[in-house]
Image: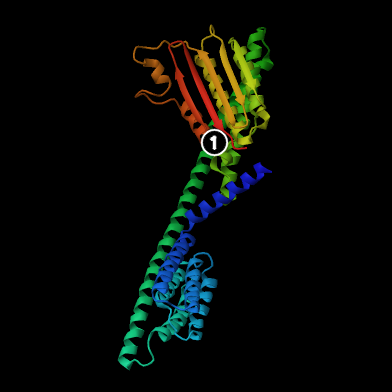
Amino acid sequence: MDESANHGADRVRAWFRRWIAGDPRPAIGVVLGVVLGAVCVAIAFSAHASTPNLALMLCACAAVATSGIWPISSALWLGGVLTLVWLIPARSISVAAVSMFLMTAMLIWAGHRRAALPFTAWYLVCVIAATVPATSSPPEMLQGVVLWSLFALLFALIGELLFRQRQANVRLEEQRKAELQAQRRAIARELHDTAVYASTMIVMRAEAARLRGTTDPRLAEDLDFIARTGRVATADLRRMLDVLRVSDNIDLADGVTATERFTISDTSLAAALTEQIEKLRAAGITVNASIDGDVDSLPEIVSSTLARVATEACSNIVKYGSRDVPATIMVDVTEDGVDALFINGRNLPARAGGGQLANWFGESNSRPKLGLIGQRERIEAVGGTIDFSGTESRWLVRITIPIGR
């Protein structure tokens, strides 16, 4: 129950952040309404305004606060409030008349430019009638009408500028999505025509060589391994191509992160660890493995991420690790998260001052290793940390991923 409640709260918070980030009008409407309401209350108390007068002023401010969410409904609400001013003996709305200008700007900003004209005319009639004394001379009345109209025109222009900027932002976002879509499709095409083709050819040649027969059992075993690994690589590549193309039709508002969308969840951590330990032993490396806790209880994205990182770490052990020193693999799953450690001996001698060791961990001026970059990006994408360190004789990879259960 607690886990589902926390997950629901996280989704609500993520939705609210995306909502505000994608369209600032709701937040700005609330801020304007609250600020205007505070000013109205301060002025009402200092001027000893009547309770009905204060209530109508606050209702006008409330309409402004909701104008970013429900512009038309809020505009109708404000028109009704300004009309009700006629029922108050004093017929004074003080600074709350500013709500009229703010509502005009918010309507136009929301794209309701045609609706803004009759609403603004409605507001002007109510506000002018409530603020311009009936005993004023015709020139004074004309001056009041012109002044209020100019203010309304000014805020209408502000709303128009905001609307055009919003439209420009929408076009830029659509262009960005189209460019990303084109990039993903181009990557999918290139991967299919290069990597998938090459891995398929490797599998076919390995199987053809195996079918021709060989008297060397180790060669036959190697050919089986090449064919099996090639098929797995081809299947992974094809799944990644499907993800790249299908992702064009996935709505980003569904709460799925980029990491979850583009991580292939085809191998569990338990299966990956078993496979990698066997791979190390087949390469002639002694393995000391310790797995504590229920790895099957990990979230799917965490399990898949650790499976990929474990595969990369063990592949590095096969390529660069010493066969004379046992490798150590430790995984500890707790209620708060998971810790993993990979240690092995080194074949590469370390020069004075870091030398090759610094190069291997990407800490010198040489180009960083892409495998290490990929591991770090995977772990950081799920909120974890990964550290690479070593000595002249050993090197290790330490991973920590917190989990909110």
Q: What residue is shown at x 51% (from left), y 16% (from top)?
A: 319
Does the rendering let one see residue 227? no
Residues 340 and 371: in front is 340
Find numbered disc 1 in the image and state the secondary structure of the residue it sits on.
loop
The answer to whether residue 223 is left or right of residue 342 is right
The answer to whether residue 173 is left or right of residue 296 is left
Q: What residue is shown at x 39% (from left), y 16% (from top)?
A: 356
Q: What residue is shown at x 42% (from left), y 71% (from top)?
A: 40
Q: Position of residue 222 (x, y in %)?
A: 62, 14
Q: Position of residue 188 (x, y in %)?
A: 54, 39
Q: Position of residue 376 (x, y in %)?
A: 48, 30
Query: In which image quadrant can residue 297 be found?
Result: top right
Crowd rating for badge 1 (residues with CA inside 10 Å; few <14, some 14–19, many 20+): some
| Residue 358 drawn above or below residue 1 | above
Residues 306 and 247: in front is 306
Q: Give the quadrant of the N terminus.
A: top right
| Residue 189 drawn above or below residue 205 | below
Q: Give the quadrant of the C terminus.
A: top right
Which amino acid, by three-letter code, is at mark 1?
Val
Does the rendering let one see residue 59? yes
Q: Position of residue 171 (x, y in %)?
A: 45, 58
| Residue 68 drawn above or below residue 318 | below
The answer to whether residue 130 is left or right of residue 333 is left
Provide the residue designation for mark 1.
Answer: 382
Query: In which image quadrant can residue 342 be found?
Result: top right
* Number of numbered discs overlaid on the protein picture: 1
Q: How is the image coloured?
A: rainbow
